[in-house]
Image (tube, helix red, strand yellow):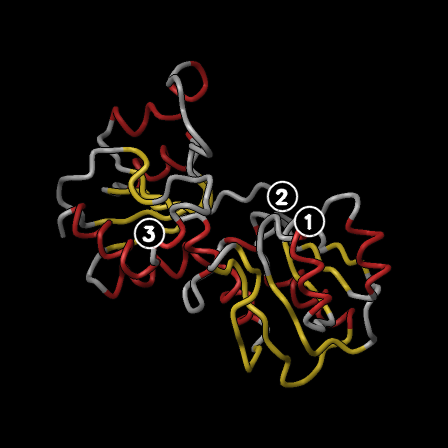
Amino acid sequence: MDCSEFCARLDEELRTDAYADLDASPNGVQVGPDGGEIEHVAVAVDAAAATAEAAVEAGADVLVTHHGYVFGSVERVTGDLYDRLEPHYEHDLPLYVSHLPLDGHQELGNAAGVADLLDLVDREPFGEMGPEYVGQRGSAADPFVVDELQDLLSAELDHGGQSVQVLDFGPERIEDVAIVTGSGVDWLDEAATVGADALITGEGKQHVYHEAREAGITVMLGGHYATETFGVRSLAALADSWGLKTTFIDHPTGL
């Protein structure tokens, strides 16, 4: 498959254009070339020298990540950024990035993957960002107790041995769950407003302790990296369905 066709297919599936004015990350091809033949796709959560080098070592023709190198604009490609990009231009390795589009996708996205893990039902988009969404909300068919949900996430998330932190301020039984992966505590107010019993996200901020306590909602912090492996794994499965070889590059940060 031609690389441009591969990237166009991803853009269409992920609705990349819909997030163009919402995302600080330039989504789509972030590092060229965007031509050439694609037979082997590597996916990873983070674009970094380590994951690019692993993609080259695996023999991949393109690297697909959730987090790219660029957030906002780039004035100069020098110093550390130049060094990070070196594997790409030395080995003609394109980089395709999907940040918020991959968070918000209701079937392939990161939040959808967490919801799949928890077997949530009656799902709907959650986490408003302008006219789009970056998360998902659903109900547990069999409500969780807090310890049970914490143990499940601790066992299943790829968090590099770190524990899942819990701010246990919600009801004893958790049925209505809101999910925004990564750095999603900014949607705590929305979770409380819609009546969620818990918000599952990746990392916290100091103020969320008091806000969760006052709102009477449980917050579970599973790790930024750990909650965002689902989307790129789903993209690997999609590429596999297109007849392409795929490799998942696991490089947990513990954060």
Q: Residue at x 21, y 62 (%)?
A: 242
Corner quadrant of residue 227 = bottom right
Q: Is residue 53 visible?
A: yes
Q: Give the image location of residue 25, x and y in percent.
A: 43, 40
Q: Residue at x 78, y 65 (%)?
A: 217
N-terminal of the pair, mark 3 or mark 1, is 3
Residue sitting at the far top:
79
N-terminal of the pair, mark 3 or mark 2, is 3
Amino acid type, residue under disc 3 in the picture:
Asp
Kindly state the secondary structure of the residue where label 1 is placed.
loop
Q: Are marks 2 and 1 in contact (CB under 8 Å)?
A: yes
Q: Residue at x 77, y 64 (%)?
A: 218
Disc 1 marks which residue? 162
Name the side, left or right, on which 67 lies relative to 223. left
Amino acid type, residue under disc 2 in the picture:
Gly
Numbered mark located on residue 75 in the image: none
Disc 3 marks which residue? 17
Disc 2 marks which residue? 254
Position of residue 84 relative to residue 207, above or below, is: above
Position of residue 46 relative to residue 231, above or below, is: above
Q: Residue at x 50, y 65 (%)?
A: 113
N-terminal of the pair, mark 2 or mark 1, is 1
Distance (Cα) linking label 2 and label 1: 6 Å
Q: Nearer the viewer, residue 118 or 8?
A: 8
Name the side, left or right, on which 31 lies relative to 163. left
Residue sitting at the far bottom:
141
Kindly state the secondary structure of the residue where label 2 is placed.
loop
